[in-house]
Amino acid sequence: MTFDGPPSGVDPNVPSIARVYDYWLGGKDNFAADREMGERVKAVVPELPLMAYHNRLFLGRVVRFLAGEAGIGRFLDLGAGLPTMENVHEVAQKARPDAEVVYVDNDAVALAHARALLATTGNTHVVDGDLYRPEPILAEADALMGLDRPVAVMMLAMLHFVPDEDADRIVRTVLDAVPSGSYLVISHIGDSPQLRKAAEFYRASGTGVVLRSAERIARFLDGLELVSPGVVPLPEWRPDGSVPALDLMAGMAAFCGVGRKP
């Protein structure tokens, strides 16, 4: 889908995190301001587009695990961003055609594209939601697909834009609302001198970024049964051989982990 212009209420001169991410992944649903910001951040941390790529590969691997091996049939993708390669519903529904997915975002372009893409998909839904107010999101997800059976909650590349006190509250609120047997999936940039420079750039542009260590990221999964191999750099979570060895960034400062609610 393409637009003749931005959706109503969208200022194409103001960059969006979701559209910068789309640009790094080679997408076309971005504006000049997004591409400019993407290039400026990339100049500070050249590895960031590769981190975005590995984050998307992790999404594919973890959804295949959840829908296949773990038998999960419901997915709640918080901060879903723009539809791109290996979307959650596409991966999940290959493993089990009855899988249901609720995508949540508040970026108008992401929502418009997602709704157009999913217009004919009956068991995939799009919700306009503010992650700082998880209760209405959970209520709508419950109405759309039900939260009475185990669900996989996806928080990919999202929590590093949320301050500590709000991030912990959001995670706890969501986990309290889902039943035993549900999973929480997290990916999160780490902390390094280069990423501190990128964080300063984002903050100067009006977007807060919170860099966290692998140990701090792991605390989001406290109280859950950690799925092997634990909290690890993105390419190291159950690699499937699809990425050339030279592309596995040793020491990549971007981590992921999966936990199961007892």
Image: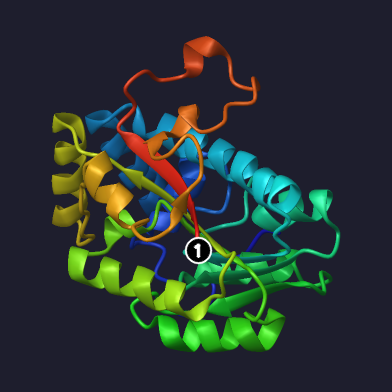
Please provide percent x and percent y for residue 45. 26, 30
For the question of whether residue 178 can be seen, the reply is yes
Residue 235's place in the image compared with 181, above or below, is: above
Instruction: Give the position of the N terminus as an image quadrant.
Output: bottom right
Please provide percent x and percent y for residue 169. 29, 74
Amino acid of disc 1: Lys
The part of the image, by quadrant, that contains residue 75 is: bottom right
Residue sitting at x 50%, y 63%: 261
Q: Is residue 162 left or right of residue 122?
A: left
Observer-nearest of 17 and 184: 184
Please provide percent x and percent y for residue 93. 80, 55
Residue sitting at x 66%, y 54%: 88
Q: Local crowd at mark 1 within 10 Å, few (<14), some, or many (≥20)? A: some
- Give the residue at mark 1: 261
Q: Is residue 10 left or right of residue 144?
A: left
Residue sitting at x 32%, y 48%: 218
- The image shows a total of numbered marks equal to 1
The part of the image, by quadrant, that contains residue 194 is: top left
Q: Is residue 33 left or right of residue 211?
A: right
Observer-nearest of 82 and 189: 189
